[in-house]
Image (cartoon, rainbow, N blue to C red):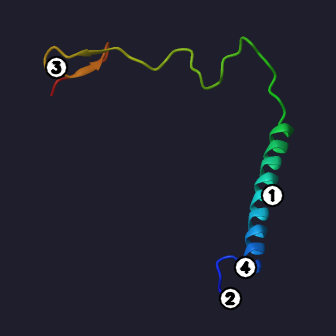
Amino acid sequence: MFGLFNLPKLLLLAAIIFAVWYGFKWLNNRQAQVSRSKPAKPFRPNARPAADPVEPDIEEMIPCPDCGVYVAKGSKHRCG
């Protein structure tokens, strides 16, 4: 009577699996529609991305001859 597999439990399990399956299917279709509806960016072969700087923000570091602390080359370092 209280067996592991009975008809109402199996029907409920099948309904849950069906709902989850079609929920994911609907979400994937929705994402595909949204990505297709976005306008394509025009192709510009010589254009650089806006976030790509022309010069990187890198400075050469040299050790201070007095205290040994590394400072940017050309900076005014005072040992204290």
Kindly report the distance in space between the C-alpha atoms of the residues bearing marks 4 and 3.
80 Å
Say whether disc 4 or disc 2 marks the residue closer to the N-terminus: 2
Check the image and report above or below for 6 versus 31.
below
Residue at image location 84% in from the left, 37% down from the top? 36
Tell me the SS state at disc 3.
loop
**Which residue lies under the disc numbered 2?**
1
Task: Tell me, yes or no, whether the two marked residues, 4 and 2, touch with CB atoms within 8 Å.
Answer: no
Say whether disc 1 or disc 2 marks the residue closer to the N-terminus: 2
Q: Residues within 10 Å of mark 3 (few under 14, many from 20)?
A: few
Say whether disc 1 or disc 4 marks the residue closer to the N-terminus: 4
Q: Nearer the viewer, residue 11 or 51?
A: 11
Kindly report the distance in space between the C-alpha atoms of the residues bearing marks 4 and 2.
9 Å
Residue type at mark 4 is Asn
Select label 1 or label 3 by which is in front. Answer: 1
Q: Which numbered tag is attached to residue 68?
A: 3
Check the image and report above or below for 77 versus 4.
above
**Which residue lies under the disc numbered 1?**
22
Kindly report the distance in space between the C-alpha atoms of the residues bearing marks 2 and 3.
84 Å
What x and y, as percent, mark residue 30?
A: 82, 49
Residue type at mark 1 is Tyr
Tell me the SS state at disc 2.
loop
Residue type at mark 3 is Gly
Say whether disc 2 or disc 3 marks the residue closer to the N-terminus: 2
